[in-house]
Image (cartoon, rainbow, N blue to C red):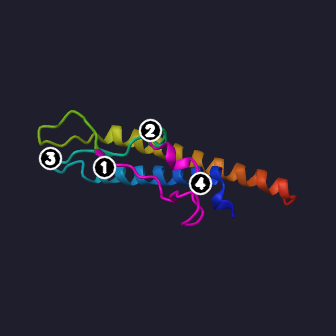
Amino acid sequence: MFENLQVFRLAHAKSVHAATRQALFAQNMANADTPGYTARDLPRFSEIIRDDPAAFGLRATRATHLNGTNRPLQAEIFERPAEKNPNGNSVSLETEMLHAADAQRQHDRALSIYKASLGVLRTAIGRP
C-alpha cells in the first residue's frame, strides 16, 4: 500500500540513486592506479527527475490503466571529464571522497524523508 504513494516512491528512487553513485565512487577509488581508467558517475538526481517528467507523473497500476508504464528511473553512467594523470587515469582520490560523502548525505536525506512521511501516516491513522 505505502509503496504506491508518490513520496515513498520518490524517497526510494533517491536512495537507490545515492547507493548506485556510492558504488561507482568505490569503483573509481579501487581503480585509482589503473592506467587509462576514467572516473565514472551518474547524473544528479534532480537532473534525472527534470529530464524524465513522466517518471513521477501519472502511473499505471495495472496493464490496462491509462496506458501508462510502471518503470524505474533510468540514468546513463557517464565518464566524468577530469584532468588526466600521466598514465591516462582521471581518478583523484580526494575528489572521489568528496563525491562519496555527498552521496552519503543524499542517501541519509532520502531515508529521513521516508521516515518522516511514515510518521505522518502513522499519526493520521492513530498509531504511534
* Residue type (three-letter) at the residue carrying disc 4: Arg
Q: Position of residue 114 (x, y in %)?
A: 65, 52
Residue found at x 56% / y 65%: 64
Q: Quadrant of the N terminus?
A: bottom right
Closer to the camera, 81 or 32?
A: 81
How far is mark 3 from mark 1, CA to CA? Answer: 14 Å
Q: Which residues are magenta?
A: 52-78
Looking at marks 3 and 4 on the same chain, the residue that comes earlier in the sequence is marked by 4
Residue 18, which numbered label?
none
Looking at marks 4 and 2 on the same chain, the residue that comes earlier in the sequence is marked by 4
Q: Determine contact: label 1, label 2, CB under 8 Å.
A: no
Q: Position of residue 79 (x, y in %)?
A: 26, 43
Residue found at x 46% / y 45%: 103
Q: Residues within 10 Å of mark 1 (few under 14, many from 20)?
A: some
Residue found at x 51% / y 49%: 55
Looking at marks 3 and 1 on the same chain, the residue that comes earlier in the sequence is marked by 1
Q: Position of residue 50 (x, y in %)?
A: 48, 38
Q: List the residue tagged with mark 4.
A: 9
Q: List the residue tagged with mark 2.
A: 47
Residue 86 on the magenta span: no
* Residue type (three-letter) at the residue carrying disc 1: Met
Q: Is residue 54 left or right of residue 94?
A: right
**Residue reaching furthest to the right:** 126
- Local secondary structure at mark 1: helix
* Residue type (three-letter) at the residue carrying disc 3: Gly
Residue 29, which numbered label?
1
Q: List the residue tagged with mark 3.
A: 36
